[in-house]
Image (spheres, grey):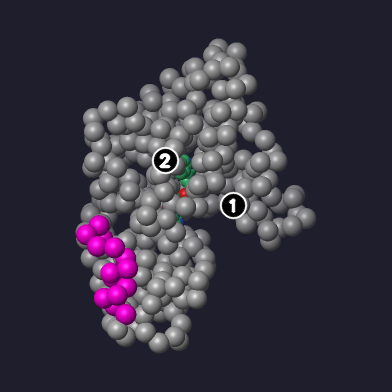
Amino acid sequence: PKTIFSGIQPTGVPHLGNYLGALREWVNLQDNATTDTTLIYSLVDLHAITIRQDPKQLRQWKKESLAMLLAIGLDPNRSIIFHQSDVPAHAELMWILSCQASTGYLGRMTQWKDKTANEKGSSEKLKLGLFSYPVLQAADVLVHRTTHVPVGHDQAQHLEFAREVANGFNHTFETDVLFAPETIISPAKRVMSLTDPVAKMSKSHANPKSRILLTDSEEVIRSKVKAAVTDSIDGITYDPERRPGVSNLFDILYHADPRRNDHDQAELVKDLQGSSMRIFKDRVADTVNAAIKDIRARYEDLVHDEGYLQDVAEQGARKANESAAATLREVKNAVGLA
Ligand code: TYM
């Protein structure tokens, strides 16, 4: 039997990077799962508060993110979908794992170094929750005895840490209660920003034109793609080093196309090499719009269905609490707490 777990922060409408890099894989795994596979997907609100959030905004984002997980095709009868803070075992296991985790390892994590690079010397302002973020993420996957975690490339290091914590715990307490899970990195593992194609597309970037949201209308998609940074080299070629902007659009075009598995990316590049930038960008916008237009329409209906969203969240919390309780009990036993 397999257990698949993954999470997304409810800090805004998911973008095309979230979708191609992770969310679409979540749905594929669900749709191709056999009956002995458990699928668990979390809106990780406790992770979201590692940076300051406005309470009203966070509450709204939680609701919108849940509606989006349903709109992309997750089925609450097949997948357990829940808000992380509704399942206290995540935070409880995190504490126990915190007593195992090395501060040296945490201090070397890329995300910590990136997020604190501007705050050098002002550790008064740096919050403990941001530092221990990976420990909570380890607890998320370990508390459900996950076997596989589908994510984008930027989460690989966090999951390496989770395996380290699981193995360390098992070794210290001479047990095998925790499973070290496997990371599944999707083919579209790193979708880049449209305005700064050497940085990844992100929810928090100041410029809204840097990302395509799953709720963007066709016109908005078209205008963002049109404004995407490319270069002044003639023709269309694929060369991520020298032409990061054009190559990112190629990646988006390739991965957003539902028929991508019928041909490889080199063929697509050959097909388009004689096109103008305008025609190339039109094709990118058309393909992205086709890939997300049904999601957008379903989302508009779902987000207003408060009663249904609440039912889904309650049902998800109940099942996730059940799944987590068994592991937590054994962990407490192993440590001598129970
Ligand atoms: P988050 O909310 O930043 O992103 C959710 C998922 O989207 C992927 N992703 C991308 N993939 C490709 N290109 C991009 N530009 C891009 N941006 C984001 C991420 O890799 C991720 O899979 N720490 C996690 C949430 C988390 C989690 C977990 C994940 C908490 N606990 C346990 C897996 C297992 C995060 O902040 O993801």
Q: Which residue is mark 2?
A: 149
**Residue at x-position 58% and y-position 25%:** 169
Q: Secondary structure at mark 2?
A: strand
Image x and y of residue 213, in percent: 37, 63
Q: Amino acid at mark 1?
A: Gln
Real-space Cα distance between discs 1 and 2?
19 Å
Residue segment shown in magenta? 260-273
Q: Residues within 10 Å of mark 2 (few under 14, many from 20)?
A: many
- Point out which mark residue 111 bears: 1
**Residue at x-position 41% and y-position 69%:** 248
Q: Residues within 10 Å of mark 1 (few under 14, many from 20)?
A: some
Residue 258, visible in the rendered structure: no
Judged by depth in the image, the label closer to the viewer, 1 or 2, is 2
Image x and y of residue 260, in percent: 26, 60
Question: Quarter of the image holding residue 30?
Answer: top left
Relative placement, left or right, of 235 versus 330 is left
Q: Is residue 180 above or below residue 19?
A: above
Relative placement, left or right, of 81 versus 55 is left
Question: Quarter of the image holding residue 161?
Answer: top right
Q: For residue 272: magenta? A: yes
Residue 47, visible in the rendered structure: yes
Question: Quarter of the image holding residue 270?
Answer: bottom left
- Mark 2, ligand 1, within 8 Å: the answer is yes
- Mark 1, ligand 1, within 8 Å: the answer is no
